[in-house]
Amino acid sequence: IMAHIDAGKTTVTERILYYSGKIYKMGEVHDGTAVMDFMEEEQQRGITITSAATKCPWKGYEINLIDTPGHVDFTAEVERSLRVLDGAVAVFDSSEGVQAQSETVWRQGRKYGLPCVCFLNKMDKVGADFEMAVESIRDKLLAHPVCVQIPMGAESNFEGLIDLITMRAVFYEPDVLGAKFREQEIPDEYAARAATWRHAMLESAADFDEALMEAYVHDEPVEGAVIVAALRKGTLAGKVHPVFVGSALRYIGVQRLLDGVTAFLPSPFDRPVIIGHKPGSDKEIPIACDPAKPLAALAFKITGDKHGDLYFLRIYQGTLKTSSRVLNSNRSRKENVTRIFEMHANNRNIVDSASAGDIVAAVGLKDTLTGDTLCDTRHPVILPSISFPQTVI
C-alpha cells in the first residue's frame, strides 16, 4: 500500500486487517495504537517509518500485505517492498489528488512493472472532489484510471458508493464499524451520473475483450463477470488502473477495495517469469512460481532483533524448510536457516516451511545482506538485486 504522506495508508491497512479477521480491535494512527506502526517513534509522530509486513485471509485467498512509509526520507523502504511484491494499491487523498510523493511511489511501481489499483480515500474530508482526483491521476501520472465505483455525495454529505459493475448503491452503517452495509437500487438523483460513468468504464474495458466490445457497440447488456475479466486483463498488462472510492476513517469502501485486490491484482502465478543468472556466467535461468522446483528466494530487508538479526525473504520458487542449509549465491557461502516466521507487524508465528509466493522472516543466517539470493545448494542462481535511491540526507 503506497501513497503520499497522510493519504491514509496505515488507516486503510488497519481496516483491511480488521475486516479480514486478522485483528479484533481497530487501532488508530492519531492515537498511536495502529498495529502496523509498532515503533515508538512511529506512535509518537503518527507516521510510518519502516515497512511492516503481514498476511491476511480474504474470501478464500491469502493476501501478503506491506504498509509502506510516505515520507521521501524512508523511500528505500518503499523501493524494497515494491521489488518483492506482485501488485500495489495506491491511496490518494480525495481533496488533494496526486501529490509530490504520489508521483515518486508511482514511478517506483512502474519501474518494477507492478499492476496497480487506486483508492480515493478521505471522500468525507472538506474539499473532497472525486472528479478532480481522477483527472489528476490521468494528467500527473499519465495513467489510465478506470472508475469501477463512484461516490454518493462528498465531504460531510458522503453517504456511500455506487458499484458501476453491478449498478447497485451501497450504504454503510458506521455504528457497527462499517462491518454491515446494505445494497439497494441507485437513488434517482444519481442514476444519470452512474450511467455516464458506467459507459466510460465499459469503453475502457472493451479494449481487452472482443465479446465485450461487440456488446458495447450494439448497446447490449453485459454481465459483471465479463467486465471484471476484461479489466483484470488490462490491469495485469499495466494498461488500466481500476479506481475505488471510500473513507477508511469512516469505515466506508474498504471491503470493496479488498474484493478489488483479489479481482484485479495478480497472484504470484500471474506474474511474468523472473530471469536469474548462473553465478559467474551470463547463462539465464528462468524462475517460475512453483513450490516443487529448486529454491530461489530474495532477502529484501534485515532488521536487528534482541535474539539476532531477522531476515525478510520473498520466496520466488521452491520451498524453504526450517533447519535447512541453503546457498547464498552472491557471496558463495552456505547458510543455515534455523527458524522461519510468518510476520504480523512485529509479532511472529513459527512455521515449518514456506513455499513460492510467500513472504516470511528467517533467523540463523550469518553473511547475508539485503538484495542477496538464497537458493538450493545444488542449483545456484542469482536473482536481480535491489537498487536503492540516493539518500536525501
Image: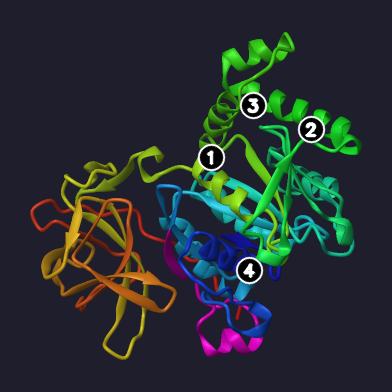
41 or 178: nearer the viewer = 178
Q: Which residues are magenta?
A: 37-56
Q: Which residue is mark 1?
A: 264
Q: Earlier in the sequence, mark 1 or mark 2?
A: 2
Q: Is residue 327 left or right of residue 39?
A: left
Q: Is residue 220 left or right of residue 109?
A: right
Q: Which residue is mark 2?
A: 197
Give how far apart the Cα atoms at labels 3 and 1 are.
12 Å
Q: Earlier in the sequence, mark 3 or mark 1?
A: 3
The colour scheme used to paint the residues is rainbow
Q: Earlier in the sequence, mark 1 or mark 4?
A: 4
- Quadrant of residue 369 in the image? bottom left
Q: Is residue 233 above or below residue 327?
A: above
Give how far apart the Cα atoms at labels 1 and 4 are.
22 Å
Mark 1 element type = helix
Badge 3: residue crowd in 10 Å (few <14, some 14–19, many ≥20) = many
Q: Amino acid at mark 2?
A: Trp
Q: Are marks 4 and 3 in contact (CB under 8 Å)?
A: no
Q: Earlier in the sequence, mark 4 or mark 3?
A: 4
Q: Are marks 1 and 2 in contact (CB under 8 Å)?
A: no
Q: Which residue is mark 3?
A: 205
Q: Which residue is mark 4?
A: 11
Q: Is residue 44 magenta?
A: yes
Q: Residue at x 63, y 68 (%)?
A: 11
Q: Amino acid at mark 3?
A: Ala
Q: Earlier in the sequence, mark 2 or mark 3?
A: 2
- Estimate the x, y position of residue 45 in percent, counting from the top left: 65, 86
Give how far apart the Cα atoms at labels 1 and 2 are.
19 Å
Q: How many marks?
A: 4
